[in-house]
């Protein structure tokens, strides 16, 4: 990958743009505006984060870190993607996630960076919900996981995730003896010497 630092700088810009939008009038007044801003932010940053991962620009510490999510088990298999949207007026569309997942019984779970990014990028269900401008939750899964569970991550947690990716800096390098590839670390580990 060329210019990993440039991609990280763009992530910092995306974080700044999100925070600017969160302080604006539209954020306070419009749930649909909040949903659109969050959806764009998540797709762009998940893609950039995965690009940094695939370019081996991230430390092993960050790649192996887990991020907390809530999981909701599937209670009724969802239909194909084309039939998983409903509308009463053909203007506002939504996914009937309550009909297919047990939102009353959340289970604690966690996702590592590669899985989190792939689920967002290749989502089947994706819905941003906000009861108020401060409480925003993102529900998502993929074609591969739709029959098992739906994940939920609070926007606050996802922003922390993006901030960690954007500011991830290696200070110590080792070589994986099995793959002969460089491994980046956030701190110098004496047990590896």
Image (spheres, rainbow, N blue to C red):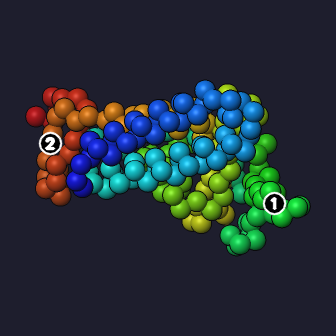
User: Residue at the right extreme?
Assistant: 88
Q: Is residue 149 above or below residue 35?
A: below
Q: Residue at x 66, y 58 (%)?
A: 125
Say whether disc 1 or disc 2 marks the residue closer to the N-terminus: 1
Callout 2 crowding tier (Cα within 10 Å): few <14, some 14–19, many ≥20: some
Q: Residue at x 16, y 34 (%)?
A: 172
User: Residue at the front extreme?
Assistant: 25
Disc assigned to residue 91: 1
Q: Residue at x 47, y 35 (%)?
A: 15
Tell me where residue 117 appears, x and y as whole percent. Answer: 47, 52
Tell me where residue 99 appears, x and y as whole percent. Answer: 82, 57
Tell me where residue 121 appears, x and y as whole percent. Answer: 51, 58
Q: Is residue 35 above or below residue 133?
A: below
Residue tagged 2: 174
**Front disc: 1 or 2:** 1
Task: Answer with left or right where residue 7 lies relative to residue 76.
Answer: left
Is the C-beta separation of discs 1 and 2 under 8 Å?
A: no
Q: Is residue 115 visible?
A: no
Q: Is residue 74 visible?
A: yes
Query: Which image quarter holds the N terminus?
Result: bottom left
* SS at badge 2: strand
Q: CA distance from mark 1 to mark 2?
A: 55 Å
* SS at badge 1: loop
């Amino acid at each position: 990958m060329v210019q990993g630092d440039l991609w990280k700088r763009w992530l910092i810009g995306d974080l700044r743009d999100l925070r600017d939008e969160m302080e604006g009038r539209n954020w306070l007044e419009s749930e649909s505006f909040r949903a659109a801003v969050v959806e764009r932010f998540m797709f762009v940053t998940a893609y950039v984060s995965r690009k940094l991962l695939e370019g081996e620009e991230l430390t092993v510490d960050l790649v192996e870190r887990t991020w907390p999510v809530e999981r909701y088990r599937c209670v009724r298999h969802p239909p194909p993607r084309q039939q998983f949207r409903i509308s009463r007026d053909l203007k506002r569309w939504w996914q009937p996630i309550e009909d297919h997942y047990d939102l009353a019984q959340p289970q604690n779970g966690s996702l590592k960076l590669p899985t989190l990014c792939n689920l967002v990028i290749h989502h089947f269900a994706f819905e941003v919900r906000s009861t108020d401008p401060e409480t925003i939750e993102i529900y998502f899964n993929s074609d591969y996981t739709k029959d098992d569970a739906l994940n939920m991550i609070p926007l606050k947690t996802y922003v922390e995730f993006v901030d960690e990716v954007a500011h991830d800096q290696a200070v110590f390098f080792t070589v994986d003896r099995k793959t002969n590839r460089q491994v980046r670390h956030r701190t110098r580990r004496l047990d590896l010497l």
